[in-house]
Image (spheres, helix red, strand yellow):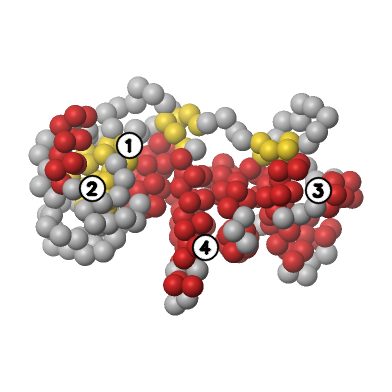
Amino acid sequence: MSTSSAPAASWPAGTVARMLGLPPSTLRAWHRRYHLPLSAPQTGSHRRYSSTDVAALTRMKYLIEQGFSTESAARRAFHADGATDVVTLLAAVRQLKIDAATAFLEAHLAAHDVVATWEQLCRPALAALCGPDADHCIDLVQGLSWAIAAALHRVTTAAGAPPPVLLACAEGDRHTLPLEALRAALAEQGRTALFLGPSLPDTALQSAVDRTNPAAALVWASRAAGPLPRIRGTRLILAGPGWPATAAGEHPATLQEAVALLIRW
């Protein structure tokens, strides 16, 4: 698999303390008493924290708030299961600590892959915020969406990869996160994908096809879409629940299916 990624980010203790909403003295005390391991390279006299470290500290803080002793929280924070990860991510988002949420997502991506992070962490967290009370937490949904997109943007592919796959939302559709996840998942497989953003008219997609000569173009519709796109010169794939099941062509039902389909060419 030929991929590349941006250099791993790291932060100083003061920045991490602000991200977590903790006094710097508390962070120092945790290190002194519980010998918390750090995965970020330590090259100077001041501690640096990677996204994995911030994720573990976010879990630790949440567990303490739920009544665990600090020692027990420190021990459990580095061995969390999937359900704990979702709760920890939501705890950061509900406090609008979006930097911490982004770092937590980056750590999950580093430990797993895009498909697993999307299915096990992102989708459950979004579903938890998009229930009956969604109108009262639009700020949280927007914050979580920003954090997911920011973490996915760090997954890149090497230059000089095969002709790109074009990804676009149907005209009028602005639900871009599924395509953000698909672009990143393809990048993990060494497949270049160009995401053209929300609500793209067919004429604009046709212009992009003419300019790039892609292997395929995938159009996402999260809700009932208009007429089927009429695109010449490439293979057209329709994804998302907005397209009728009777529409001609291939209709991947999941992120994993879409990745498997698009890496064939």
Q: Which mark is residue 200?
A: 2
Residue 94 appearing in the image: yes
Residue at the right extreme? Answer: 33
Front residue of 115/17: it is 17
Label 3 sits on a secondary structure element that is helix
> Vertical placement of 128 versus 30: above or below?
below
Q: Nearer the viewer, mark 1 or mark 3?
A: 3
Label 2 sits on a secondary structure element that is loop
Q: Which residue is mark 3?
A: 24
Q: Residues within 10 Å of mark 4 (few under 14, many from 20)?
A: many
Q: Nearer the viewer, mark 1 or mark 4?
A: 4
Mark 2 vs 3, N-terminal side: 3
Mark 1 vs 4, N-terminal side: 4
Label 4 sits on a secondary structure element that is helix
Q: Identify which residue is drawn at 25% across, 34% down.
A: 265
Q: Identify which residue is drawn at 72% across, 31% down.
A: 41
Q: Identify which residue is drawn at 14% across, 43% down.
A: 203
> Vertical placement of 115 versus 215: above or below?
below
- Marks 3/4: CA distance? 26 Å
Quadrant containing the N terminus is: top left
Residue 112, position as x, y percentages in the image: 54, 46
Corner quadrant of residue 21: bottom right
Name the amino acid type tagged 1. Answer: Ala
Q: Which residue is mark 4?
A: 140
Mark 2 vs 1, N-terminal side: 1
Q: Which mark is residue 193?
A: 1
